Every structure is written in C-alpha cells, then in structure tokens.
Image (spheres, grey):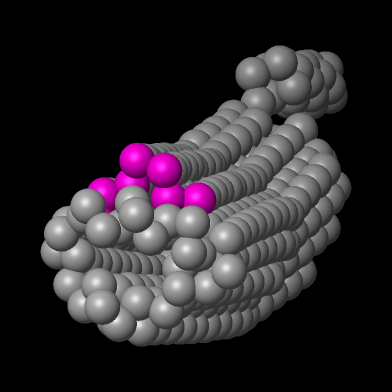
Amino acid sequence: MVQRIITAILLTAAAGCVTGCMLMLGQSKSDYNYVMRGETELSNAQLRGADLINARLEEANLSNADLSGANLQGANLIGANLRGAILEGANLTGAQLNGANLTWADLRRANLKNANLSKARLVRVNLARCNLQNIRLKGAVLSRSNLAGADLAGINLNGADLMGANLSGINLDGADLGSAVLSWANLKGANLQKANLAGAQLDNGDLSGAVMVWTNLEGAFMKDSSLRNAKLEGSRLKGADLTGADLTGASLTQTNLSEAKMQHANLINANMRDANCHKANLQGANLNSADLSKANLDEASVENAEFTNADLDHARINRKWKKYFERLKVRNYESIRWVN
C-alpha cells in the first residue's frame, strides 16, 4: 500500500515537471501573473482585457501582443517595444510611453488622455478616433499616421516627424510645430490658426482650404505645396520658400511675404491686399487677376511674372519696372505708387 502511494506521488511530480518544462519551452504568455512577476519578454502575449493599472513595463518587449481592451492607466511603458501590438479600445490614460515603439500598432478607440508619447515612434498608426486630450507628442515620429479630425489645439509638436501623415481637418490652433517635418502631409482644411510653423518642412503638402490666420511660417519650406483657397491673413511668411506652390484663390491680406521665394508660384485670383512683398522673388510667378491693391512690392523681383487683370491700386513698385508694367494689362495702373 505504501509502495503504491509513493509511486503515485512520484508520477504526479514527474507529470508536473513535464508540464512546467513544456510551459518554459512553448510559453503562450496568456497568464496575467506572468506579467506581474516582472517578465519583460512578452512578445505575442495574450493580455486582452487585462488589468495592468500602473504596471511597470519599462523597455518590455510587447511586440504583436494582444492588449485590446486592457487597462494600462498610469502604466510605465517607457522605451517599450509595442510594434504591431493590438491596443484597440485600451485605456492608456496617463501612461508613460516616452520613446516607445508603436509602429503599426492598432490604437483604434484607445484612450490616450494625458499620455506621454514624447519621442515615441508612431509610424503608420491610426489615431483618428482616439481620445488625445492633453497628450504629449514632442519629438514623436508620426510619419504616415492618421490623425484626421483630431483636436490637438495648443499641442507641442516641435521637431516632430509627420511626413506623409493624414492631418486633414485637424485642429492645431496655437500648436507649436516649429521645425516639424510635414513633407507630403495632408493638411487639407486643417486649422493652424496662430500656430508656430517657423522653419517647418511643408514641401509637397496639401494645405488647400487650411486656416492659417496669424500663423508663423517664417523660413518654412513649402516648395510645390498646395495652398489653394487657404486663409493666410496676417500670417508671417518672411523668407519662406514657396517656389512652385499653388496659391490659387488664397487669402493673403496683410501677410508678410518679405524675402519670400515665390518663383513660378501660382497666385491666380489670390487676395494680396496690403501684403508686404518687400524683396520677394516673384520671377515667373502667375499673378493674373490677383488683388495687389496697397501691396508693397518694393525691391521685389518680378521678371517674367504675369499680372494680367491684376489690381495694382496704390501698390508700391520700383520705378525700374514702370515700362514693364506699361505693357501689361493691369487694373489701376495709373494709381501705382512708383518708388525709387
């Protein structure tokens, strides 16, 4: 009898050992306690709906992990690898994601209120329906991501990489985008009123219909960008590069375009009343039917520029261009203010 009991105990122990070894070799990482023990190698982990409030997952490998519906409020995910992770509907309120890699992550309907994503990688991420209230994204990489319609008024995106991102209809009122990379980005209908875009790269971008009233665009690189029907009243574009840009129907009243590069730009029907174009380069630009009344074109370069039907009422133009404008069919030629 005793021998049978001993044999049963040994068999049970052996079975437990085999099971444990199998878990070690082929761990599915679906156990919530596996995370709680401090494990950081969690690729492909099954943590759907897990309660991970204030969890310490700094630099953890959570690539391709399923965290959909998980509660990660206040979690430390600094430097974590979340590439390809599923975070659909996850609660990331106040989470620390500084420097985290979220490339290709699924963040649909995620709550990112007060989350810190400074210097995080969010390449090709869909953030369109997320709660982004008070989110921090300074220095983040958001290239080719979707932020269409998001409300990011006043956010600090200084130096952020948003190349090719979808930012159509986004609210960036008063935001800091100084030196940000927005090449090829879709900013159609975006609200950039009073935003700082000084030194930003906006080349080949779509800013048609965007609102940029009193916006700082000094030194911005906007070559070949589309600004059709954009509102730029009172904005600062000193030294900006608008070479080949399409500004058809744009509103540029009282805009500072001094020293701006606008070679071969399309300014047909643009409203440039009271605009300051001092020393601007307008060589080969098309200003047909543009309103340049009271505009300052002093020392501007206008070689081969077109001004057919443009309104030059009380515009300031260097006297050396008088014969050139005599040959053009402009409106209010007689009221042009010729300056030496």
Q: Check the picture and name the quadrant holding the N terminus.
A: top right
Residue at the spot x=30%, y=82% of the render? 335
Q: Nearer the viewer, residue 138 or 63?
A: 138
Vertical placement of residue 89 versus 48, above or below: below
Q: Which stretch is magenta?
A: 301-307
Examine the rendered structure and indicate whether residue 184 appears above or below residue 167.
above
As rendered, which of 271 and 202 lies closer to the eye?
271
Query: Left or right of 114: which side holds 203?
Result: left
Is any atom of residue 211 visible in this view?
no
- Residue 241 in the figure: left or right of residue 31: left
> Viewer-proximal residue, 92 or 131?
131
Q: Is residue 319 above or below residue 9?
A: below
Q: Residue at x 65, y 26 (%)?
A: 27
Q: Where's residue 288, x and y in %?
A: 20, 57
- Which residue shows up at 74% across the image and 22% down it? 24
Whether 303 is among the magenta residues is yes
